[in-house]
Image (cartoon, coloured by chain):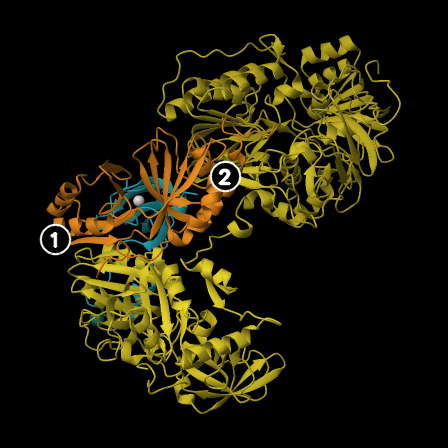
């Protein structure tokens, strides 16, 4: 006890802090109480320094739980940060302490923040010759060799400082503390121009072709001092030519009665707290081990001031050097012993040890030893998660009692303890060799000789004995998964139910499915299953390792892809005008299109219904304009351009005259409508094809696909010009008059400029191509100018104040009144041109075109196919919801209800003075005049089936 | 995220590509001459092997070229890429 | 078809015009320069690389078409970017497009060549300065290391979620961005630049 601090007074007392520990004092709150810790602490080490044993409680049983480990493998100490910003489900062992931290222990699950996260998050792509995961001795050695030979190296480690196992063991290298060696090496590497050393960076996932995802925690440890403009967490997306996994190992525990009581801790973790954090995890300890490693821990703790009451070793022959060293310090070693019970109210107060059942009768007796600490080592498990994720196989190492990396087809290898290499000296050499091999794999020259620092001589090791559980009549508190509260009793229930695969036992018991994904318990669970079934752990295998290695915040994964940057917003050259005019916008694919323009003025704003009726009236009775720039536009050039278009459109395009325009429909080979638009013939060998807004890229890709893969003999080139042009649709009986004024040089009379023709002209002083096409049935023009001049043209159109701007909603109403379908709204990939009532657009003359053969299939000529028809609700004020189904009975039968089809478009029409809809209805054209019903909520709304063309069916309005 | 070697641009991330399904399924010479069943076979039926598979990819975010790749569907390993129109290479 | 643009007296507006002031502010620290180069002439050229027309076009421009994928060739005030095995983008100064179209069509001399004025289809954004690579690495998956993607390299790829033509120059990068995506890319660049605006040298390392 000599070294323990005896300082008293105020919150600064840290009764379990070792004497001589230095650093800035940090204040924090945990579970409502004030504490002090030191700079460099984790929340776990600070709590231990203050003698806080119970940190959290278990999820199912509500049992108190303490700190069990000293890193990201922690199964128990789940906490929630409350201030400065709420963050749930963190392990106290990885939360770096900062001044002002407020945290609470969790009962297995946390609470999401109830306010938006103010922090920034980002992502970065990185490339390297060699990625080294883990900055322990092997990782630093590997990175050093690769980096000094000139390779581009990334060295990533999840902890705040490099050193890995050296931080906990306090071993020396070249006579200096390992921690100093690691810090010096990492600094030297970071100074090289092609090297990046990433601290606080956890590699989460290892995917195909060495694509590796890591998360760097950049400002989490700064608390309220974190700069607002620095991304808090950063996702690294790394493509590495070679990967070296120097990920070390996790100590595992043993299943025995009461192995979850606060005060039970992994031996290596206790060693880390004493050596690295200068904290004593208790006063008097019993050590329970299956291998030599716990002896080093016990001796370090004894030197630090923890009384080691006894070491219970399951083996009869521990390492002789270790036993001798214990004898020197007066530590009793009980060979062939196990821990049979842990006693205490809420934390350990005594430990019962006894000879192993098979050794009973050899003289030993059960003993109860007073202690506040029980250190456990069930052996060490190489961290093979990433190797396995990368597609590597695993093989069982009998000596280690764990799985180690086997074969892999990716350019990845493990180094150091991650592949089962035991001693520090061997790990350094193994890392250096891995670095050398990585260089060769990346096509770089490795140095002929590699120096590794000298490590202390380690005692000859005695073999470990792989004991998974202490046998007992009651397995109710023999925990295998502390976080999921899974005990040996539950594993036995699973095997007793006939489950013989670890994957099945995992799903049956939930062992290994918590935040820690079984880092300390996965192998133990397998060991217990193997024990129960009487099979080898080796043949049982492991459960699948999946990303992420440790939990990752959604905010980090989202990065800057949130808010306005979540998905690209595409805008036209006129966008600023629409915004200034107060338009509401509709998302069409990634485009923002003006939806409608509420009229500005005194009083309450115009609602959508009033605005759309007004805009529709303007288009039908006066003159209105719409930004049509989003339509896809493709320049199709070449001697065979007409041949290509004849093959892709259902109708004939080769007969189109230069100067003219034709509407066309494209189908997939299965005969279903894919897109529609207009084709403008600019010259014998040149066309301009327009597509729907959402399909611009798909149609260009479609053309390229056929040209490149099926018809490479056709001499045609296609080029997207969608954004080259801004397009203004000028619509309505007075559109000719407005155009004439804007384009005094253009003959606009019907004979000079007939329907479905185009003219080049100067409009408002801007070079333009004017097309006489109409998507509303009214006299209309589409004026195309370079998009640089789009705004100027639009402002000129709007200048006189007589042209009403209209949005997509009005456009939809106008076209629906005319029965013009919208691909993707009135079609869904199962609709043929004939279904749309467009038999006329399917050429009978062409020998073939894409889709033609399918029109001869029995399926496309079924009489009960769904046809596009109009619907008139019997109550002219009732607006049907789009998507509503249709039945022909006035009372709904029992489900499943046979439905005849559904509403695809539904609007209020100013021109018709009522509501109407378009629908796809089975045998619809044969039902014109029939009454159908649309179930809407509890009601059946009666509707009458009509032709889909409801306005101006004779087409009298298009010439003005 | 696969690294797919575009025959023109070199290795690029999978996200730059579009998948085009089984390669070497030619558009029939004369669709009108096919029975409904033969036409349906062209439209709807594709192989789905475990192992080597010749398939089409388009480097849509890059050079916009279609090409073919022989990929092992079990391991995602790409054994060869070759340009449209070229014969499928023999993989040992 | 009369090529639009050059003759008009009406006012032009470039796709990222609204960002000029914010680009300037982000460039004030010295480590990074963001700017739009508006109204460049851009001609999309498609021609069989092995045809006599391809050679004649190179001669007519004074710049042979770069045949190596992912490279650019420059000469005079023109730059020719490889976009695909039979596709190039010819970039020239403001106002050059009508003349270029004419010259290229003439050089084609009736052979199957596609020459399309796409000057307004994309705008050019400059990302230059010593932090340019850092900024782009936030959204560009390509390896932009100078040994891999140095001056003279061109790639069609994506930046964040937008397609771009990325051109490496001596002093930084140019992004040719579809006009409708220009505002998105500009906003994204400004956001990705936040850590680099005030710290011209050294990683913005919080620790
Ligand atoms: Zn490519």
Instruction: From the viewer's side, name the closer residue of A302 and A362.
Output: A302
Would residue A40 be found to the left or right of residue A742 on screen? Answer: right
Label 1 secondary element: loop
- For the residues labelled 2 and 1, the Cα–Cα distance comes to 49 Å
Figure chain in yellow: A
Asked if both marks, 2 and 1, belong to the same chain, the answer given is yes
First along the sequence among labels 2 and 1: 2
Q: Chain of mark 1?
A: C
In the orientation shown, which residue stands out farthest toward the bottom? A929
The residue positioned 60% from the left and 48% from the top of the image is A504
Instruction: From the viewer's side, name the closer residue of A466 and C152.
Output: C152
Tell me if residue A321 can be seen: yes
The colour one sees for chain C in the rendered image is orange
Indicate the position of residue C184 as horizontal and vertical percent values: 46, 50
**Label drawn at residue C111:** 1
The residue that disc 2 covers is C25
Q: Chain of mark 2?
A: C
In the rendered image, which quarter contains the N terminus of chain B? top left
Tell me if residue B26 can be seen: no
């Amino acid at each position: 006890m000599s070294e323990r601090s005896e300082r008293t007074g105020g919150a600064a007392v840290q009764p379990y802090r070792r004497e001589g520990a230095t650093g800035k004092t940090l204040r924090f709150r945990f579970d409502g109480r004030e504490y002090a810790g030191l700079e460099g602490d984790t929340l776990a080490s600070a709590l231990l320094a203050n003698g806080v044993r119970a940190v959290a409680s278990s999820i199912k049983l509500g049992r108190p739980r303490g700190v069990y480990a000293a890193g990201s493998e922690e199964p128990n100490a789940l906490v929630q940060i409350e201030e400065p910003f709420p963050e749930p489900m963190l392990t106290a062992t990885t939360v770096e302490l900062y001044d002002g931290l407020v945290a609470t222990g969790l009962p297995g699950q946390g609470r999401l923040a109830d306010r938006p996260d103010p922090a920034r998050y980002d992502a970065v792509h990185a490339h390297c010759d060699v990625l080294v995961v883990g900055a322990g001795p092997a990782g630093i050695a590997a990175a050093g060799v690769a980096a000094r030979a000139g390779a581009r190296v990334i060295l990533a480690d999840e902890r705040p400082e490099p050193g890995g196992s050296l931080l906990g063991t306090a071993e020396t290298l070249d006579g200096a503390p390992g921690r100093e060696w690691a810090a010096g090496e990492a600094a030297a590497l970071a100074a090289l121009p092609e090297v990046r050393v990433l601290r606080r960076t956890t590699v989460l996932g290892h995917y195909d072709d060495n694509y590796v995802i890591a998360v760097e925690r950049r400002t989490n440890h700064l608390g309220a001092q974190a700069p607002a403009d620095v991304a808090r967490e950063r996702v690294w997306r790394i493509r590495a030519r070679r990967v070296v996994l120097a990920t070390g190992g996790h100590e595992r525990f043993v299943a025995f009665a009461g192995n979850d009581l606060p005060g039970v801790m992994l031996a290596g973790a206790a060693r880390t707290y004493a050596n690295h954090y200068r904290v004593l995890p208790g006063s008097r300890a019993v050590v329970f081990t299956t291998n030599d490693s716990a002896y080093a821990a016990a001796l370090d703790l004894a030197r630090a001031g923890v009384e080691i009451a006894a070491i219970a070793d399951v083996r009869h022959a521990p390492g002789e050097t270790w036993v001798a060293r214990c004898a020197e310090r007066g530590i009793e070693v009980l060979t062939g012993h196990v821990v049979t019970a842990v006693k205490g109210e809420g934390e350990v107060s005594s430990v019962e040890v006894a000879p192993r059942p098979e050794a009973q009768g050899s003289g030993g007796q059960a003993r109860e030893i007073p202690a506040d600490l029980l250190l456990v080592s069930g052996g060490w498990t190489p961290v093979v998660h990433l190797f396995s994720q990368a597609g590597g196989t695993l093989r069982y190492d009998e000596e280690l009692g764990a799985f180690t990396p086997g074969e892999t087809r990716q350019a990845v290898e493990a180094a150091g303890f991650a592949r089962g290499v035991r001693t520090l000296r061997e790990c350094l050499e193994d890392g250096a060799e891995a670095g050398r091999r990585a260089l060769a794999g990346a096509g770089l020259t490795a140095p002929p000789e590699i120096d590794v620092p000298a490590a202390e001589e380690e005692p000859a090791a005695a073999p470990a004995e792989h004991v998974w559980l202490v046998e007992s009549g009651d397995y109710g508190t023999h925990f295998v998964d502390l976080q999921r509260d899974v005990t040996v009793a539950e594993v036995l229930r699973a095997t007793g139910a006939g489950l013989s695969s670890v994957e099945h036992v995992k799903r049956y018991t939930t062992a290994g499915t918590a935040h820690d994904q079984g880092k300390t318990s996965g192998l133990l669970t397998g060991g217990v299953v193997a024990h129960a079934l009487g099979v080898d752990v080796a043949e049982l295998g492991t459960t699948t390792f999946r990303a992420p290695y440790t939990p990752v915040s959604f905010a980090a994964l989202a990065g800057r892809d949130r808010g306005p940057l979540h998905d690209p917003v595409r805008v036209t050259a006129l966008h600023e005008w629409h915004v200034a005019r107060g338009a509401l916008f509709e998302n069409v694919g990634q485009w923002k299109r003006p939806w409608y323009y509420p009229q500005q003025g005194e009083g309450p704003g115009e609602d959508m219904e009033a605005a759309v009726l007004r805009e529709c009236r303007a288009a039908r009775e006066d003159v209105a304009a719409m930004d049509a720039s989003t339509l896809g536009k493709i320049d199709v050039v070449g001697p065979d351009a007409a041949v290509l278009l004849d093959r892709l459109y259902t109708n004939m395009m080769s007969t189109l005259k230069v100067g003219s325009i034709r509407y066309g429909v494209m189908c997939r080979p299965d005969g279903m409508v894919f897109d529609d638009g207009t084709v403008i013939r600019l010259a014998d060998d040149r066309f301009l094809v327009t597509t729907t807004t959402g399909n611009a890229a798909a149609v260009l890709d479609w053309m390229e696909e056929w040209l490149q893969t099926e018809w490479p003999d056709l001499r045609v080139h296609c080029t997207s010009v969608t954004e080259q042009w801004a397009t203004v649709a000028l619509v309505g009986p007075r559109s000719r008059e407005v155009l004439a004024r804007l384009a005094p040089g253009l003959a606009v009379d019907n004979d000079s400029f007939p329907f479905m023709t185009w003219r080049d002209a100067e409009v408002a002083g801007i070079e333009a191509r004017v097309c006489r096409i109409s998507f509303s049935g009214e006299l209309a023009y589409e004026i195309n100018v370079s998009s640089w001049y789009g705004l100027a043209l639009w402002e000129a159109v709007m200048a006189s104040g007589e042209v009403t701007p209209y949005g997509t909603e009005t456009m939809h109403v106008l076209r629906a009144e005319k029965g013009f379908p919208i691909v993707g709204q009135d079609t869904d990939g199962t609709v043929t041109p004939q279904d749309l009532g467009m038999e006329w657009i399917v050429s009978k003359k062409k020998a073939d075109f894409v889709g033609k053969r399918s029109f001869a299939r029995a399926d496309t000529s079924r009489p009960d196919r769904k046809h596009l028809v109009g619907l008139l609700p019997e109550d002219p004020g009732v607006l049907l919801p789009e998507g509503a189904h249709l039945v022909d009975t006035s009372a709904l039968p029992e489900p499943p209800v046979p439905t005849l089809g559904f509403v695809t478009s539904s609007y209020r029409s100013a021109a018709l003075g009522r509501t109407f809809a378009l629908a796809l209805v089975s045998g619809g054209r044969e039902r014109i005049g029939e009454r159908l019903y649309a179930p809407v909520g509890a009601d059946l709304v009666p509707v009458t089936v009509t032709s889909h063309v409801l306005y101006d069916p004779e087409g009298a309005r298009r010439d003005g | 995220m696969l690294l797919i070697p575009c025959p023109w641009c070199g290795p690029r991330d999978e996200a730059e590509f579009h998948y085009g399904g089984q390669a070497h399924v030619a558009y029939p010479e004369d669709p009108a001459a096919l029975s409904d069943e033969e036409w349906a076979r062209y439209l709807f039926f594709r192989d789905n092997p475990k192992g080597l598979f010749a398939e089409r990819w388009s480097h849509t975010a890059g050079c916009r070229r279609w090409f073919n790749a022989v990929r092992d569907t079990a391991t995602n390993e790409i054994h060869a890429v070759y340009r449209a129109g070229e014969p499928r290479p023999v993989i040992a | 078809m009369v090529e639009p643009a050059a003759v008009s007296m009406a006012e032009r507006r470039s796709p990222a015009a609204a960002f000029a002031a914010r680009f300037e502010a982000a460039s004030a620290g010295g480590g990074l320069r963001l700017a739009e180069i508006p109204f460049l002439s851009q001609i999309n050229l498609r021609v069989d690389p092995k045809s006599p027309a391809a050679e004649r076009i190179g001669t007519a421009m004074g710049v042979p078409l770069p045949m190596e994928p992912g490279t650019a060739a420059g000469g005079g005030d023109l730059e020719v970017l490889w976009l695909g095995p039979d596709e190039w983008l010819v970039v020239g100064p403001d106002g050059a497009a009508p003349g270029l179209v004419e010259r290229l069509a003439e050089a084609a001399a009736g052979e199957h060549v596609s020459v399309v004025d796409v000057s307004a289809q994309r705008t050019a954004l400059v990302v230059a300065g010593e932090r340019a690579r850092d900024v782009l690495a936030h959204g560009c998956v390509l390896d932009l290391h100078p040994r891999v993607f140095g001056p003279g390299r061109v790639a069609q790829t994506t930046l964040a979620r937008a397609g771009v033509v990325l051109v490496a120059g001596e002093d930084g990068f140019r992004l040719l961005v579809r006009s409708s995506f220009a505002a998105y890319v500009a906003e994204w660049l400004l956001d990705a630049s936040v850590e680099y605006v005030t710290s011209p040298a050294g990683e913005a390392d919080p620790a």
